[in-house]
Every structure is written in C-alpha cells, then in structure tokens.
Image (spheres, rainbow, N blue to C red):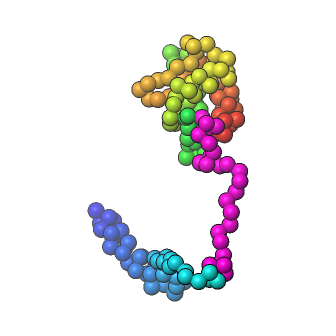
Amino acid sequence: MLRQTFLRRAAPMRLLNLQTSPAFSVPLCRRLTTSPSSSPDSSSSSTSPPPLSATPTPETAPASSRPPYLVSRTPSLNLPVYTETKRGGNKKLTVLKKIEGDARALKEALRAELKLEDGQIRINHVTGHIEIAGFRKEDVASFLAKQGF
C-alpha cells in the first residue's frame, strides 16, 4: 500500500521534471497547420513527398494474392507451432495456434502440402487451433515460412 502511494506521487513529479528539463527543449506537442497557397511559385518551391515503392507490401498486396488467413508470431517472434503428447505418450500431435481468419482454408492448404488424409488433420473449434497427427513441426514451420508468415 505504501509503495503504491509512493509511485502515484512520484509519477507526476517525473513528468514535471521531464517537461522542465533543458534536454527536452522541443515542445511535447506540435501542431501541424496547412494553408492553401494562392501563388503558383510557392507550390513549385515546396518539396513533394518521396514516391512510394512499387513493390507491394503485405498490406498493399491485392486481396486475391493474399491467403484468407493469418498466423501471428509469438512475442519471441517464433512461429506458433507446438508438439504435444497425449494418452501417456501414445498419441503425438502437432498444434498450430494463433490463427486468424479462415482456418478451414489453412487446414486445406496444410492437408494438400503435407499430403495428409482427412482424419489426420482437424480444427479444434473450441480453441481455434489446428491439430495434426504426428510430430510435423518442421514441415508446418517450413510451409508457413514459404507463405510469408
């Protein structure tokens, strides 16, 4: 309780010291104003922004070339592919987590890539994870790397 009170009191003082510090002579908030120019000379002397790159980024790529799903990486920037064992080590699974979008399309793409039968890959509809029979972490990770995730 005492520590929380101290932190609450110390935080505004730190902000006050930050604002009055000579190292921070730039105002904390800048206002950008634009005014239309009436003379053509002033518009020709202003610099235009650099052109955007012609290569499509994932955000600007056409929707038809992007898959309808997204696999986010973990906070440590690894792919969310895990191996699990169940039934005393008798059942081996590979689990793909952090799926957004159309999980069915990802399931079908994985099934085609890994040449799996329909019973070997399934979607857990409670958690949204894809479970694959067997330890296939390297295969799934290489597939996701090829897809650009």
Residue 78: quadrant of the picture: top right
Q: Residue at x 50, y 79 (%)?
A: 35
- Is 46 a magenta residue? yes
Q: Position of residue 8 (x, y in %)?
A: 33, 69
Q: Quarter holding the C terminus?
A: top right
Looking at the image, is 66 positioned above or below residue 86? Answer: below
Q: Position of residue 93 (x, y in %)?
A: 57, 21
Can residue 93 be seen? no
* Towards the viewer: 39 or 67: 39
Q: Seen from this angle, which residue lies furthest bottom?
A: 22
Looking at the image, is 53 positioned above or below residue 83? Answer: below
Looking at the image, is 30 positioned above or below residue 85? Answer: below
Can residue 40 be seen? yes
Looking at the image, is 56 positioned above or below residue 50? Answer: above
Q: Position of residue 19 (x, y in %)?
A: 44, 81
- Is 142 a magenta residue? no
Magenta-tinted stretch: 43-67
Q: Quarter holding the N terminus?
A: bottom left
Q: Main secondary structure of the magenta part?
A: loop
Residue 62: quadrant of the picture: top right
Q: Residue at x 71, y 53 (%)?
A: 54
Q: Position of residue 117 (x, y in %)?
A: 61, 13
Q: Residue at x 56, y 30 (%)?
A: 96
